[in-house]
Image (cartoon, rainbow, N blue to C red):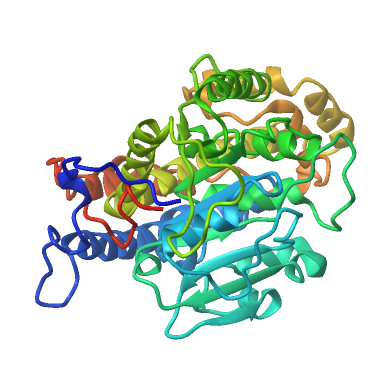
Amino acid sequence: MDIKGKGKAKDPSLTPAGSNINVGSDGLTAEEQLYQETVHRLQKSYSKKIKPLEQAYCFEGFHSAPLTAQDIGSKPMILLLGQYSTGKTTFVEYLLGESYPGAHVGIEPTTDRFVAIMNGPEPKVIPGHAAAVSGDLPFSGLTKFGTKFLSRFQVAQLNNPLLSNLTLIDTPGILSGSKQIQRGYDFTSVINWFAERSDLVLLLFDGYKLDISDEFKGAIQSLRGHEDKVRIVLNKCDQINQQQLMRVYGALMWSLGKVIPTPEVNRVYLGSFWPKYKTPVGTVYEDNIDLLISEQRDLLRDLRSIPKNAALRRVNEIVKRARQARVHAHIIGHLRSELPSMFGKNKKAKAMLDDLPAEFRKIQVKYNLPPGDFPNPEAFKKDLEAFKIADFNKFSQRLIANADEALASDFPRLMQKFPTSNNQAGNFGFPDSGSS
């Protein structure tokens, strides 16, 4: 569908790509120069001051593997989630203005794998096993999900201006119903892995698929801790009339309220995202066009801010991870120090595991740590049961001091380099909001 308002003034923020972007002598925009410098400094601080702390206390066994240089330096990422046939792949084609290698669209469940759509000199598909061992791609951490998952993962490359600024992650359609067919890998853990590395997570619904299946509910709940990245899109709104749209919107908000337990009301973007080269399927109602134009403009403006703010987001993610690693080290160090030197280690370890919230409170008071930085006690206990507390390293004040230096000095110095002006973002390869 081509949604364009006749005679409407064009939004100045939606000018063609490059028209308001200054390019330096090295061919990079100011945002790209800042991003490269920030990534280099983050890689240095993380590898020297945060990664040793993670490795010393097996942070990987409780959270995620240490970040590689490719993880920190990767382009901004957008993750798309939704039940089957809600328009995820079509939305990707709308953004790109073309289809990507290996894409298939239909009313039945079609995308049966995770697909990372990235920039490349020519269209090609890289199988998951090859992508996971490639030193040029940020997907080495996916090897922990095993062969069955990697067989359901691939990288699609094509030369597209949008992909020079970010990476899109298309996901398998989630089936409706309470009982799901086993996929052969931990779907929600994979979602969490991508969400942790994404700059934005889009949850797509359409007016005919508002039910949230058990698997979709688990996927949404795996996004906890990343709520600031989540945006909700009600797609295919041109296929329902204005009265139906009001009812559908209310039903969606009610369904989300049961799955996302936050006091804030989630922003839901309305739209109908069809590439120019495709004809909309089904009846198209015209009474919502002005509303959809406005909503799509808001969503695209939100998406355009991602490349512009990529460097700031990278700092934010590393700071968040550093705080988690620091608290984790204090927890492990405390539990290790409480064990007796000779006999009764197992008994003491079991007693501490059985009353982990009380141990957390001791650590909070002893080291003046904020309660909000601590993990969920039940989840932490489950992970900790796979280890012997006596086998962990003793508490190292030197490693903690290095992490504190990064948090108190290195990262704040990086923040001072960001401009305070709030100039409008360029297009960065995104389509105009009035076109589909």
Determine whether, in the image, residue 17 is placed left or right of residue 201: left
Task: Tell me if residue 363 comes above or below residue 100 in the rendering.
Answer: above
Give coordinates of residue 281: x percent, y percent: 60, 51
Give coordinates of residue 427: x percent, y percent: 26, 56
Give coordinates of residue 404: x percent, y percent: 39, 42
Kindly indicate the quadrant of the structure image that contains residue 166.
bottom left
Q: Nearer the viewer, residue 378 or 204?
A: 204
Task: Tell me if residue 124 comes above or below residue 86 in the rendering.
Answer: below
Kindly indicate the quadrant of the structure image that contains residue 260.
top right
Q: Is residue 85 at all visible to an observer of this figure?
A: yes
Q: Residue at x 39, y 63 (%)?
A: 43
Q: Residue at x 63, y 45 (%)?
A: 86
Q: Nearer the viewer, residue 286 or 369?
A: 286
Q: Nearer the viewer, residue 392 or 163?
A: 163
Give coordinates of residue 287: x percent, y percent: 43, 30
Q: Nearer the viewer, residue 185 or 16?
A: 16
Task: Tell me if residue 363 comes above or below residue 142 in the rendering.
Answer: above
Determine whether, in the image, residue 21 is placed left or right of residue 386: left
Q: Is residue 339 at all visible to an observer of this figure?
A: no
Q: Residue at x 41, y 53 (%)?
A: 436
Residue reaching furthest to the top:
263
Determine whether, in the image, residue 262 is placed left or right of residue 31: right
Task: Tell me if residue 149 comes above or below residue 243 in the rendering.
Answer: below
